[in-house]
Amino acid sequence: MKTIKEKEAELLEDFSMFPDWNDKYNYIMDMGGELPLIPEEHKNAQTKVEGCQSASWLTVDKKDGKLYFKGDSESILGKGVISMLLNLLNGHTAEEIEKYDFNIVHQIDLPNHLSPTRKMGLESVMKRIKELAKQNM
């Protein structure tokens, strides 16, 4: 399995192929179609990510010492951002995920291309991933 940093490098290479942010947004939204979705019955107060502009949810399962997240959002961009992050982190240990710095979002300059409320949602998703990792250590 690839390391998180190897996956990050591949994602950076993918983003470098797109000349402008409209193309990058489309790429992120396309990633949302690959998101492992949460069953409707698991969309509740415990799985909801607080602070997102659009309702978003995250769950995690632990198997053989590795974490596997599922997520969903009412927003196509939110789904894409969640999918992008989960693609990097799924299949890694809680310790690896808890130590991860999410620098990728700054390397692709995502926070500077989101509205303030979407930026807050991004930060909330990253924080919730860390919390779930910590709970599964």
Image (tube, rainbow, N blue to C red):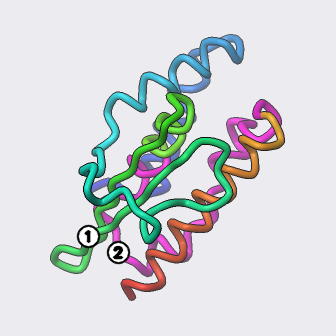
Q: Is residue 51 magenta?
A: no
Residue 40 at x, y = what percent? 28, 49
Q: Main secondary structure of the magenta part?
A: helix
Are the residues tagged 1 and 2 within 8 Å (C-beta)? no
Q: Nearer the viewer, mark 1 or mark 2?
A: 1
Residue 12 at x, y = what percent? 57, 35
Residue that carries the numbered disc 1 in the rendered image: 61
> In the rendered structure, which amino acid carries the disc numbered 2?
Thr
Quadrant holding the N terminus: bottom left
Question: Residue lying farthest left?
Answer: 64
Q: Which residues lie in the magenta part?
A: 85-114
Q: Is residue 13 left or right of residue 109?
A: left
Query: In the displayed structure, would residue 8 be above or below residue 96?
Result: above
> In the rendered structure, which amino acid carries the disc numbered 1?
Asp
Q: Residue at x 45, y 55 (%)?
A: 57
Q: How many C-alpha atoms fall within 10 Å of the one at disc 1: few (<14), some, or many (≥20)?
A: few
Residue that carries the numbered disc 2 in the rendered image: 93
Residue 103 at x, y = what percent? 67, 54
Instruction: Give the quadrant of residue 43.
Output: bottom left
Instruction: Give the quadrant of residue 66.
Output: bottom left
**Which numbered disc, 1 or 2, marks the residue that appears first in the sequence?**
1
Secondary structure found at label 1: strand
Secondary structure found at label 2: loop
Residue 60 visible in image: yes
Q: Residue at x 49, y 55 (%)?
A: 5
